[in-house]
Image (spheres, rainbow, N blue to C red):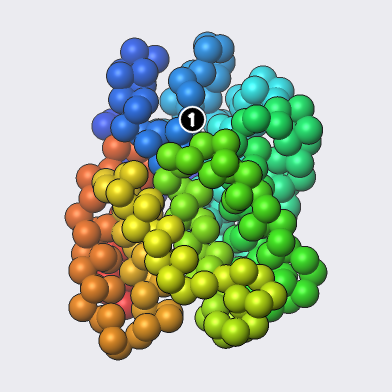
Amino acid sequence: MAWTQFPYPDDAYVYTPLSLEAAWKRLHTGDVELFPQQDRLVQAWIAFHAGDFERAVKLGLAAGVPGYAVAHKATCVYATHLETDEERRLALYEEVAERCERQQQEQPDNPAGFYWHAYSLGRYALGISVVKALAQGLGAKVRNSLNRTVTLAPLHAEAHVAFGIYHTEIIDKVGGMIGGLTYGASKDDGYQHFKTALALNPTSALAHSEYGRALNMLDGKKKLAEVLALYGQAADCVALDAKERLEVEAAIDELKD
């Protein structure tokens, strides 16, 4: 099945190896990924940042385990923002989760294998329903992988966003008491993870919009002004690549709604 094309192509997102290295720290503040040492992985990341997610996955997988991080990220960003078939989206998340489990065995100190494991399972859970996913034990797997991620990489801003989502979704679906006693979920802890993510990466549309979504889910009208402000800040973020552009556009859509 053909992959949907990135709908906002922009020359500003097309990097050369030199310009990618220069922009790398800013582009990867969220995931603290290291600049690749293999030329083919540089090309994979160039494809990713330009929005050619299918090519990024192919190049990443062709490099074996060292290319898994770019393959995980490209697959997950594509599945989250561009895949319109729900069955296909869930299958992509499952593929990433399975690859991550292999990567965890071969690279136990690489946070990418744990973060994308948590991300893919978390998004899969949202697709099948959080309650059903919790009954299948996915909540513990997500929490354990996120704990491992932040242990290995305390400055991993997107792991803190994912942790915030974890707390928010569980409290929203099963309530504070069951969420806390059974799954270790807490509204305050969730909010703190979002604040940490924003402190680590203040230019992140993702962190702003997910924090706004959490406030809206758990506090509703009481925090409406803050919710709107966070979505507005997300919409105003300057995108430096395809992923960031998709996150900005998602925030703009939320504001319209």
The residue located at (71%, 48%) in the rendering is 97
**32 lies above or below 75:** above
Find residue 67 and report its horizontal and vertical position in percent. Answer: 62, 25
Find residue 243 and report its horizontal and vertical position in percent. Answer: 41, 44
Find residue 163 and report its horizontal and vertical position in percent. Answer: 52, 58
Three-letter code for the amino acid on which mark 1 is drawn: Glu
How busy is the neighbourhood of tag 1: few (under 14 within 10 Å), some, or many (20 plus)?
A: some
Q: Quadrant of the C terminus?
A: bottom left
- Total marks shown come to 1
Q: Relative to residue 61, is residue 255 drawn left or right? A: left
The residue located at (35%, 28%) in the rendering is 25
Q: Which residue is mark 1?
A: 33
Can residue 178 be seen here? The reply is yes
- Foreground: 51 or 186? 186
- Foreground: 149 or 181? 181
**64 lies above or below 188:** above
Q: Residue 240 falls in which quadrant of the image?
A: top left
Q: Relative to residue 15, is residue 2 drawn left or right? A: right
